[in-house]
Image: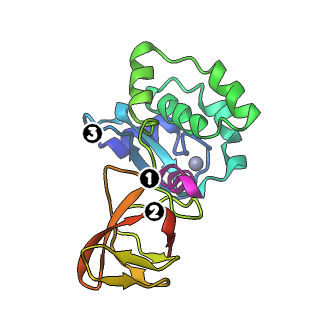
Amino acid sequence: MSIEASLKERSGNKCELCSSVEELKVFSVPPLEEESADRALLVCTDCLLQIEDEEKMNINHWHCLNESMWSEHAAVQVMAFRILKRLTSEGWAQDLLEQLYLEDETRKWAEAGLPDENAVKTLDSNGAELADGDTVTLIKDLVVKGGGFTAKRGTTVKNITLTDNPQHIEGRVNGTRIVLVADFLKKA
Ligand SMILES: [Zn+2]
């Protein structure tokens, strides 16, 4: 039986997080060790979009975890745990997280997929997170030492690269690759 078929059978053809029956997809829970039904769950597109993009999180949607976190399937428990972890500013989510019991092995798996809290984010002047490939605008004139020119305020820098230093990014201005201070940039 295919993974999808066994998940459909297991779930009764429903999203294993919110019970929706709309547009169900197989979601393999990262970090992926093997493709198997035990490592995956059936989710609806609504849940999937929010799992994949934290900025799309609709807090009220996730009251469904109140029930689904009690699933006997580890993959469902793991996703419930990770989603609740994103919502700990909500009292009810914090309560559920405290009630959620995970076997040691499941807990390890669940925690392996959490964002690295030690990783420091690179933020622009407005506090927006910057990522490789972003386009930014300079918010002040910058004298480029060694470049012999001034990068003017309002200059657009495309396809930036993050560096090991969260205050600095690299980008190309006037054909020269330079280091820019994140505080002087605005995400375009
Ligand atoms: Zn769902």
Q: Nearer the viewer, residue 134 or 13?
A: 134
Sort mark 2 into few (<14), some (14-19) or many (20+) by Cα contacts within 10 Å: many
Sort mark 3 into few (<14), some (14-19) or many (20+) by Cα contacts within 10 Å: few
Q: Residue furthest top?
A: 104
> Does the magenta portion include 48?
yes
Question: In the image, residue 78 lies at what x, y percent?
Answer: 48, 30
Sort mark 1 into few (<14), some (14-19) or many (20+) by Cα contacts within 10 Å: some
Q: Secondary structure at mark 1?
A: strand
The magenta segment is: 47-55
Quarter of the picture holding the N terminus: top left
Q: Amino acid at mark 1?
A: Lys
Question: In the image, residue 180 lies at what x, y percent?
Answer: 38, 67
Q: Which residue is mark 3?
A: 35
Q: Give the residue at x 35% y 50%.
A: 165
Q: Which residue is mark 2?
A: 182
Q: Secondary structure at mark 3?
A: loop
Q: Give the residue at x 37% y 46%.
A: 4
Q: Which residue is mark 1?
A: 25
Q: Amino acid at mark 3?
A: Glu
**Which mark is nearer the camera, 2 or 1?**
2
Q: Earlier in the sequence, mark 2 or mark 1?
A: 1
